[in-house]
Image (cartoon, grey):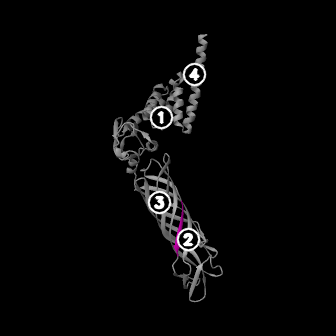
Amino acid sequence: MSALVLALVLVARGGEYEVHKSQAELYAKRGFYADARSELALAMDTPEGRTDPELAWTAAQVAWELQDVEAAIDMAETTARLASDDDVRESAMAWADNLRETFGFLTIAGPYAGMTTRIQLDPRSTIFDPELKRYINKLGVTLRISTDLPIRIGLPVGDYLINGEAATVAAGEESTVALPLHAMGSRGMAAVQVARMEIAAGVAAPFSDRADNTLPSPEVEIGLSEPLGPLTAGIAVALLAQAYREEGSVARAMGGSIAARLGRDLVLHGPVSLRPGVVARAGWMPGIPYLCDGSGEAWACSPASEAPELSSTVYATARMVGVGGELLFEYREAGRTTSLGTGVRLGVEHAWGTVPSQAEAVLADESTIAWTAIDRTVEITAFRMLGQVAIVF
């Protein structure tokens, strides 16, 4: 009877092992590494799991994805010990040895026990291995979330800044960096913010009753942004190839502007942030239609929307000033000081302007005619959608 009970228990345990192993592999394939680790622990608690080199190798890879270098080394060595195949054994040992030679361990401590802060990990040494770069990026995103101190992490050999404080990691060795109070919390994150060059390109779409001939047009913007405590301020120069309908055809003329903006970065999830802000802009916009009395040596012209009975058309360039709001959705691989950020900027602005009181127009026969604007004011609402790349300089 006891032998039968033991056999049933062994069968049940064997089925339990297969279930947990399959579930762990499924979680790992889908990128749910924390769940995969839990299932692996249950599978490895069975007799079959303790002797399965394939399970140990899966555990090593999952530990690596979770930035647990010590566990990855331990599981790789376990794989080598359990493997009957020489190639598998040599491959697992080579990976474990490489991790030992490539990584050291850094303890990040606060000024007092039990403190919590967001941590900015900023590598100062050049890393060429793309897998190590991916590891640091993932670890940087994890640390950027609120972290309890002290914390011990595995890092590739090299020099780092931790919230602006210098640290050096040597292969297989332990090191410590103690963050002073000024490097904690929002003050610490503000200290590691950096100036950026922002290059954006996309479409601007102006709308106005007095300029209903304007069309969505390409715009390019180059600017600088600088952190000011919790806020981010910036200035940019934009060039606009404004398209507008001109007597049955589409014409283009260059417009431009200078913009000043002020926003605040809000972390949404990991490397994704949202920056709502306000923007003020001054510039010029071509293609404003005026209809004129074509008699005489000088024309008197009114906005096209107000004088449909006139037949001669000229197009004015208005000087504009405006204000508005914008949202920047941005992805930065490892936090604020990463060398590259990509995003999308959405904005809406309302601008007021005037056209020149007097100007000259070129007629079809290439002669010129002087004209005077009767009503010079213009109001325009513009929508913008720009893709952006931000670069540390």
Q: Residue at image x 57%, y 74%?
A: 288
Which residue in the structure is indicated by mark 3?
199
Residue 379 visible at all: yes
- Distance, label 1 to label 4, CA atoms, is 25 Å
Which residue in the structure is indicated by mark 1?
63
Q: Amino acid at mark 1?
A: Ala
143 inside magenta stretch = no
- For the view shown, which residue lies furthest in the bottom direction? 296
Span of residues in magenta: 347-354
Q: For the residues carrying marks 2 and 4, which lies nearer the camera in this image?
A: 2
In the rendered image, the quadrant that contains the C terminus is bottom left
Q: Residue at image x 58%, y 22%?
A: 14
Give the secondary structure at mark 1: helix
Which residue in the structure is indicated by mark 2?
379
Which percent across, then down, holds residue 131? 45, 42
Q: Amino acid at mark 4?
A: Arg
Q: Marks 1 and 4: CB-CB under 8 Å?
A: no
Which percent across, then down, holds residue 158? 36, 43
Question: Height in image: 185 above or below 261?
Answer: above
Q: Residue at image x 53%, y 27%?
A: 42
